[in-house]
Amino acid sequence: MAQRIVIDPVTRIEGHAKITIHLDDAGEVTDARFHVTEFRGFEKFCEGRPLWEMPGITARICGICPVSHLLASAKAGDRASDGA
Amino acid sequence: MAGVKLATVWLGGCSGCHMSFLDLDEWLIELSERVELVYSPFADVKDYPAGVDVVLVEGAIANEDHLEMIRNVRDRSCILISFRDCAVTGNVTALRNPLGSAEPVLQRCYVEVADIHGQIPTEPGIVPPLLDRVIPVHTVVPVDVYLPGCPPSADRIRAVLEPLLAGEVPHLEGQQIKFG
């Protein structure tokens, strides 16, 4: 009998996710999916906000790797303002 | 109060507050002797257990899974701590609220800037629909203690947990209740 195995939640990761594994009648794996269940929309809500807010906001994309997001947005800001 | 059942829950946020919790460093050893961590993203427990004494809830309520989770957490916990600015005010997670609904952020990220197969993901029962407005924890369930900060420093987390472990009500003031 076809079956779906759900791993919920996936632990020890940054972000929220589930994994589904789909089995056919013979119990063989036919598909496996990684579902990202957390979504905040930085790509949209950052639009139109002051440039100087970006390092502080984008650092909150991920509490484990905030520095990489902070530096990337600072560099992007420098470039956009022709400073680098 | 040995054997206090402690849980930490992570809703719509960045996990920075959980990282701040790990910044408790050597006090974690002392804490581990006094509490039993029964549910947490740090552990591999899948279901939120009953009979939790203290729970730290990080993050805002942003989707339908969060709504179901926070109601379960409230039902099964004695003291619920609204842990960090996203839980207390909505903070960065709620920055999409002025757009009016979840649709503009989903459309932008999954369709307009998609390199291939642009479509908004749906998987009934698996991928929870986003709420149109991100809301703080206390608007859904009663909160016992507020612990602000983005993230709160390890000292501030300790200033809340220590009195609770001693059976006292924590009282934050001055620098300890600063947002950000």
Image (cartoon, rainbow, N blue to C red):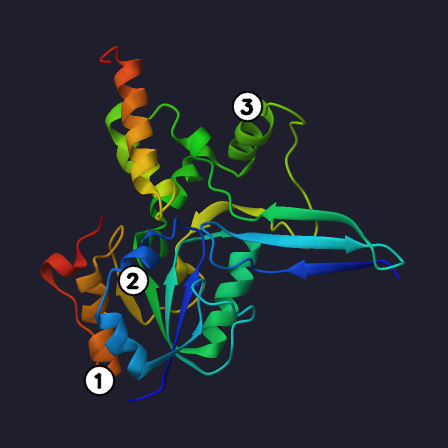
Q: Where is residue B177 in the image (x, y as percent from the top left)?
A: 18, 59
Q: Please state which of the two labelled residues, at mark 3 or mark 2, is closer to the viewer.
A: 2
Residue projecting furthest to the bottom: B1
Please give the name of the residue rendered at 22% of the width and 48% of the height, measured from the top-left corner.
B180
Q: Where is residue B38 in the image (x, y as percent from the top left)?
A: 45, 76
Pointer 3 and pointer 2 on the same chain:
yes
Q: Which numbered marker is on residue B113?
A: 3
Please give the name of the residue rendered at 39% of the width and 63% of the height, measured from the top-left corner.
B57
Lower position in the chain sequence, tag 3 or tag 1: 3
Secondary structure beneath label 3: loop
Q: Is B91 left or right of A4, judged from the image as shown?
A: left
Pointer 1 and pointer 2 on the same chain:
yes
Q: Position of residue B1 (x, y in %)?
A: 28, 89
Q: Mark 3 lies on which chain?
A: B
Residue placed most toward the observer, A9 or B140? A9
Q: Is residue A1 depicted above or below A46 in this figure?
A: below
Residue placed most toward the observer, A11 or B106? A11
The reply to whether discs 3 and 1 touch (Cβ–Cβ < 8 Å) is no
Q: Is residue A64 depicted above or below B163 in this figure?
A: above
Q: Crowding near pointer 1: few (<14 within 10 Å), some, many (20+)?
A: few
Q: Crowding near pointer 2: few (<14 within 10 Å), some, many (20+)?
A: many
Q: Which amino acid does label 2 sit on?
A: Phe
The reply to whether discs 1 and 2 touch (Cβ–Cβ < 8 Å) is no
Q: Crowding near pointer 3: few (<14 within 10 Å), some, many (20+)?
A: few
Q: Which amino acid does label 3 sit on?
A: Val
**Badge 1 is on which residue?**
B166
**Badge 2 is on which residue?**
B21
Lower position in the chain sequence, tag 1 or tag 2: 2
Secondary structure beneath label 1: loop
